[in-house]
Image: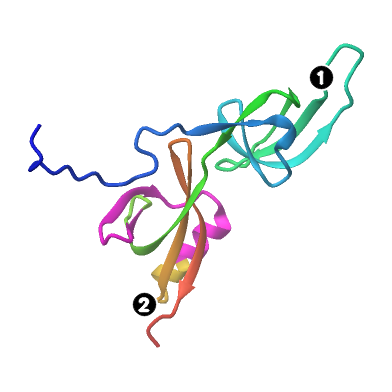
Amino acid sequence: MSDSEEHHFESKADAGASKTYPQQAGTIRKNGHIVIKNRPCKVVEVSTSKTGKHGHAKCHFVAIDIFNGKKLEDIVPSSHNCDVPHVNRTDYQLIDISEDGFVSLLTESGNTKDDLRLPTDEALYNQIKNGFGEEEGKDMILTVMSAMGEEQICAVKEIGGKN
């Protein structure tokens, strides 16, 4: 290979990276994240039992799936490792909403992202639809949460607007 050849790699953190990382169960706290039944969850309650005569202390996790809101529970020995999802939040500017419920978003690099549906959460859905549709001219920033290969719109901010 000659020195004149240059290789350019776009630096993306998720290029072949694992969707989760291990963390000791005893160190996971409330409001942290954990994978239960292959679903990324936010921990809402943690309780630790004392060690038994021959055993480990156990951590009882109560968590809510970050995408569908379902409540999941798991009991893990506190010295064992649990999978913790890499959760990212990214802000995009809303460009358009198609008739079939997909949104067109502007990325930081100036490209468009057209593979996300409007959220199923009714309040968020209405806030986006009303802000974009009726009062044309409101610029809206949508926050997209991604974890374990899934993405979903989780928040909306209105910025400025034409008066």
Foreground: 46 or 98?
46
Q: Kindly identify which residue carries mark 2.
A: 137
Q: Residue furthest right?
A: 53
Chain part drawn in magenta = 103-129
Give x and y (percent) for residue 125. Answer: 50, 57
Foreground: 98 or 92?
92
Check the image and report above or below for 155 versus 34: below
Check the image and report above or below for 125 versus 150: below
Give x and y (percent) for residue 61. Answer: 74, 33
Relative to 90, 33 lies left or right = right
Label 1 crowding class (10 Å Cα cut-off): few <14, some 14-19, many 20+? some
Question: Is-magenta flag for residue 32?
Answer: no
Q: Quadrant of residue 41?
A: top right
Q: Which kind of residue does numbered mark 1 sit on?
A: His
Relative to 116, 26 lies left or right = right
Give x and y (percent) for residue 2. Answer: 8, 36
Q: Quadrant of residue 4?
A: top left
Q: Which mark is residue 28?
A: none
Q: Kindly identify which residue carries mark 1.
A: 56
CA–CA distance in space, label 2 to label 1? 59 Å
Relative to 86, 13 lies left or right = left
